[in-house]
Image (cartoon, coloured by chain):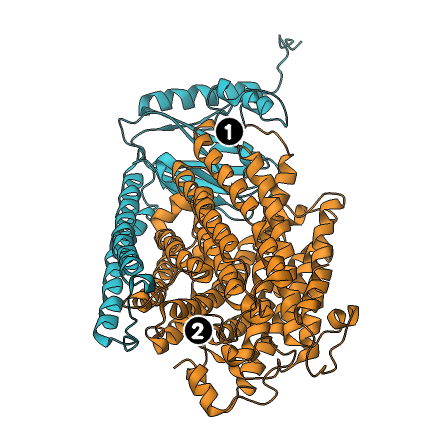
Chain colours: A cyan, B orange
Amino acid sequence: MTRGVTQISREIYDLHMLILWVCVVIGVVVFGVMIWSIIKFRKSQGAVADTTLVHNTKVEIIWTAIPIAILVAMAVPAAKTLVQIEDTRNTELTIKVTGYQWGWQYDYLEGGVSFFSRLDRESDAARQLASGADPYKIEHYLLNVDKPLVVPADTKVRLLVTAADVIHSWWVPAFGMKKDAIPGYVNEMWFKVDADKAGLYRGQCVELCGRDHGFMPIVVDVRSKEDFEAWQKSTAEAQKQAAAPQQPATVPAAG
Amino acid sequence: MAHDTHATAHGHDAHDDHKPHGWRRWVLATNHKDIGTMYLVFAGTMFFIGGIMAMVIRAELFKPGLQFVDPMFFNSMTTMHALFMIFGAVMPAWTGLANWQIPLQIGAPDMALPRLNNFSFWILPFAFTILLATLFVPGGGPAGGWTLYPPLVLQTGDAFPMVIFAIHLMGVSSILGAVNVIVTIMNMRAPGMSLLRMPLFVWSWLITAYLLIAVMPVLAGAVTMLLTDHFFGTTFFTAAGGGDPVMFQHIFWFFGHPEVYILILPAFGVVSEIIPAFARKPIFGYEAMVYAIASIAFLSFIVWAHHMFTVGMPLAGQLFFMLSTMLIAIPTGVKVFNWTATMWKGSMSFETPMLFALAFLFLFTIGGFSGLMLAIVPADFQYHDTYFVVAHFHYVLVPGAVFSILAAVYYWLPKWTSRMYDETLAKWHFWLSAIFVNILFFPQHFLGLAGMPRRIPDYATQFTDWNMISSIGAFGFGLSQILFPIIVIKCIRSGAPAPAKAWEGAHGLEWELPSPLPYHTWETPPSPEVIARGAEH
């Protein structure tokens, strides 16, 4: 796991490292006692069993109380981060994400931009059964799309996540957030990429959704706020043009 | 055929007590030993079939790129692998061990309901034939995951009603088996065998049986709703009709979480017998162990949504399920500490049952640690539906449940067959299994943390190295398992005669029975002296 590029991803990383170290320490202690026992208390080395050692109330209380304390110590920071994650107030941009079999539809509700994002053609050709293609020769094999999701950095971006057919799930590891895309539901999630972390971030669908579940990746192109505004404006314009009804070359004058 | 070797293994009884012969002995079996044997042979066969499916999966995942199978077939392999292992291998293996051991350990002549017992077993080969046949019908086998989430599962082809039917049959088998276990334990304990004197294996099965009765009907309800959604126009799980796909997940996991405890509680029982036997020391904290199993069983009912943290759950729900899930670590920890304390100041020897039990202790604990990590909801957002989860549950199921089953078979085989297995071959089986299982599953933690999703047949090239190592582990582990039937058959055919008490430190009523084991045992209940000598305290 990496620290990621959002405040939440960093907090999640820290929680992960904390629980990991707690488990390592407990493991070292407990496995240490086990290994010590295996070495010291062997019949082949002449050990004689102490068959009276079947209770020790003091020790039993300690090894129940200490784990409870550790769990409480873990639960507090975890709950804090969870409360932050669930705080979807004051978002600055909303994008609707719809999972399809097998690609993602992105709709910029206020920006007038809308497009479908699918696995890049080069990856798609290479991943066909027995294609003989070498995945190593393809850049970002299986993690490339034709049209990435474009978002501004330093902006609390809200995603409204839903699906059109079966359950999918939208995940970019670098952002630390994952949400299921469920037909009939509109799930809310948000992320805010650090101001200085513009760039391309990749993720995948993470809920089995049929044959090509492994082949509907996510690419997020994080740009500066200005770049994003410019992109959104020009893309919306281009989409409007493309959708406009055909006009005749000249309008015949009346009379 | 395996059945015939078992028939000769039981030997010729001094008093031939109406023991049937030929196919009738097995098809019409009512003897708990015979039915136990059939369950175990069935479970072993299903383990190999599920294992071959796993080999297909790991072969495809050896390198990036799609080399061998269509993605749809790959999905059906992951789905069927789980269904076969959970419902075909582990659960019937535990039922086989229950059938063999519970009457012997409580001083009862047989299970309370012998004909029901027969029916419970024979449903299973029928059900699994139907399930295996789905691979050959239009649309192929089920490919929506063993968790059967709608709407995806409703896209299953002709296999769909076959899968639902097979699951219903397996459920009936489990429920009837559980009823038999409870009635036997509650009614047929020999005089003097009070509940708090029973071996921990019997306790673990008593509690497991209650879990089975509580949750198998819930699964039945869930899959019936899938059936009516598909065929009869209901919309339980279709939003367009006013239904809710997530409701399925709630119902399924309300079954599903207790189900995983059904898979592991008997393992706790087995290990609680084997470690004291080979440490030559009574289990540390017997009552605490009983209460711990009961607490775990109770808590298992209130944690189910930890499988669903990303569905869009309200904050209060996420907090509740995080805390209740973390709580399970406490009684589980108590058990691990008690097993360790049993070893402490013992006098240990390391025959194969003990080796498997100790491997369980180490490796199940690792699986428990990854489970605790998964309970932390914000962290779970990064782990959910990745290989980190796959690593977690395989650690608790393979070196957890499967190793305990192997330990139990090695432990009790000398009793069942009155012959010793080949200890050298068995140690080879152990070491190869223990080493390869870690090569197979430990790297999957790294894959999950690196961002590799579950249930994908092909992956981005940064995931190659750990996948390759995991696949090598899989091939090694799979091949090592071939040793096991060889060892069992060799034991039955030509093992050295085993004494009534095959292990120096073993306690329990089963070891008070003579070797060779009569076809019918405890027709006269054990005397109080025998119980005192054999019973757990």
Residues indicated by labels 1 and 2 sit on the same polypeptide chain: no
**Residue found at x 37% / y 53%:** B366
Q: How many marks?
A: 2
Residue at image x 26%, y 48%? A21
Residue B17's place in the image compared with B241, above or below, is: below
Element type at mark 1: strand
Residue B344 is left or right of residue B31, and the answer is left
Q: Depth check: A179 or B458 in front?
A: B458
| Residue A5 horizontal side relative to residue B133, left or right | left
Q: Is residue B375 left or right of residue B266?
A: left
Q: What amino acid is found at the position of numbered circle 1 in the picture?
A: Ser
Q: Badge 2, how many Cα within 10 Å: few under 14, some, many 20+?
A: many
Residue A93 horizontal/vertical position (percent): 37, 35
| Rendering coords of residue B11 (x, y %) | 67, 72
Query: Residue at the location (64% across, 75% down)?
Result: B32
Residue B391 place in picture, x, y as percent:
44, 47
Depth check: give the residue in front, B34 or B178: B34
Q: Which residue is mark 2?
A: B506
What's the chain of the residue with tag 2? B
Q: Residues within 10 Å of mark 1 (few under 14, many from 20)?
A: some
Residue A210 visible somewhere in the drawing:
no
Closest to the observer: A163 or B265?
A: B265
Marks 1 and 2, Cα distance to the nearest angstrom?
71 Å
Element at badge 2?
A: loop
Q: Which residue in the structure is indicated by mark 1? A: A114
Of the two numbered discs 1 and 2 in the rendering, the one whose residue sits closer to the viewer: 2
**Compared with residue B129, is residue B56 higher up or lower down, i.e. above or below?**
above
Q: Picture coordinates of residue A112 (x, y %)? A: 47, 28
* Quarter of the rendering containing residue A158: top left
Mark 2: which amino acid?
Ala
Q: Which of the image's four quarters has the N terminus of chain B?
A: bottom right
The label on residue A82 is: none
